Image (spheres, helix red, strand yellow):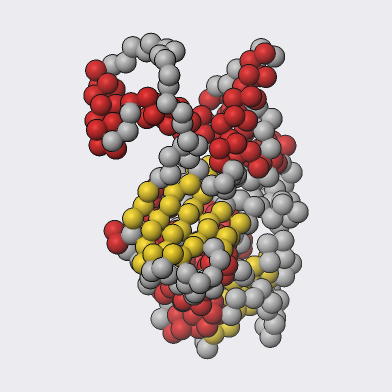
Amino acid sequence: MPTKPATKPIKSIRMSEEHQDALRLLSAYESKPETALVEEALDLLVQSRALAYRHALGLPHEAVAPTPETVHEVVPRIREAMRTALAGGAHAPSEDEAKSRLRERARAAEPIAG
Amino acid sequence: MIARWPTGRCVQDDLPELRQTRAGLRGFLEQQHPAWSGTEPFDGATRADTFTFHNGNGRGAVWRDDRRGVLWLCSASDRHDEGYDRARALASDRRLYPQLDQAYDVDGRCATVPWGECPDEDLLEALRFTGGSSETLGHLAGADQDPTEFDNGIGWIRLSAEADVWTMAIRRNLVYPDAASPRSRWLTNTELERVFVELTGQNPDDAHFWAPPHNAFHINIHFIGGPLSPGQWLTQRIDALLAGHAEQALRAP
């Protein structure tokens, strides 16, 4: 998804020396502004959560199975679903909650003969 | 579509001991259809549709898995009586049949358990992912043809060519219908490389892997030379199996 250059600072973030160094290096190595890298990284972070959050957020199969042409739709859909979830008082499931869901599924599966 | 393959147990325990039957196994696998005829039902079977396997003096057992449309080679030996005795012992130890997802979704055509819990389910799915891709993508001859895609509802690969440079785009996640969501996962970098190797026969060091910006879902691979044909893909998989390399492109994390 193409990014628009920021016109004004909207957030001040304290970052560790190590991550500042990584940002400077990446910016130099890829010849990209630091802002563009942070925006790109945020998109990737949200996308990387897609499989984990899909069920809790009630997203359909297609929402996390994009083609290169539809991948730009993923982050807005997840953001909107997160906004709705937060408005309803819901948060991301913890690892323990996710494991509980797996165990419930395993218990619900009916064995076949043989 | 892969419709015949040995179980993981058969590959691990039986295959290394096979000499005379090894050539017969190649012939068995070159015929990729699940039908089986000409041998009698196996008398040690604990499931329907289990038959004896014959190759020269060698004996074993096969099971026709109608849910998945696959004929599993469950047991094989170079010797006649010992081959049957071994298959009976395995059946009695509940080790004869493949380790499969009991909740396999016939309508959705997919397993439901997380990867790693049912190794033979994973093995079959991995083979059908790259084998199905090869059937779809392997017919693309060059830049004068439109890009082509493989999409089995779980994984996705696109192949295109521009002049002499080919581009393979692989979606990095496997995503299942809702009922099977615990099986959804991201492919590792090693798996992505192995998918590329299985479909092209090329060394990944000779290709250029790059990630498109703002897109964690796909990896793009530029390479020279084009894909393997479906026949070459199958031959490569059988050669690797008979050489003792049983690992598939996709595997449990």
Residue A101: which quarter of the image? top right
Identify the residue at horizontal 37%, vertical 30% (top origin): A37
Q: In this picture, is A57 found above or below B137?
A: above
Q: In this picture, is B101 found above or below A1?
A: below
Identify the residue at horizontal 53%, vertical 58% (top origin): B158
- Residue B252 location (% of width, % of height): 48, 48
The answer to whether residue B75 of the structure is visible from this angle is: no
Foreground: B86 or A11? A11
- Residue B86 location (% of width, % of height): 54, 70
Q: Is residue B8 left or right of residue A19?
A: right
Figure quadrant of the C terminus of chain A: bottom right
- Residue B110 location (% of width, % of height): 66, 52
Foreground: B10 or A2? A2
The answer to whether residue A57 of the structure is visible from this angle is: yes
Q: How many marks?
A: 0
Identify the residue at horizontal 65%, vertical 25% (top origin): A81
Q: In this picture, is B3 found above or below B117?
A: below
Identify the residue at horizontal 44%, vertical 59% (top origin): B167
Q: Is residue B27 left or right of residue B189?
A: right
- Residue B210 location (% of width, % of height): 37, 48
Foreground: B98 or A46? A46
Furthest-front residue in this view:
A7
Q: Is residue B118 left or right of residue B12?
A: right
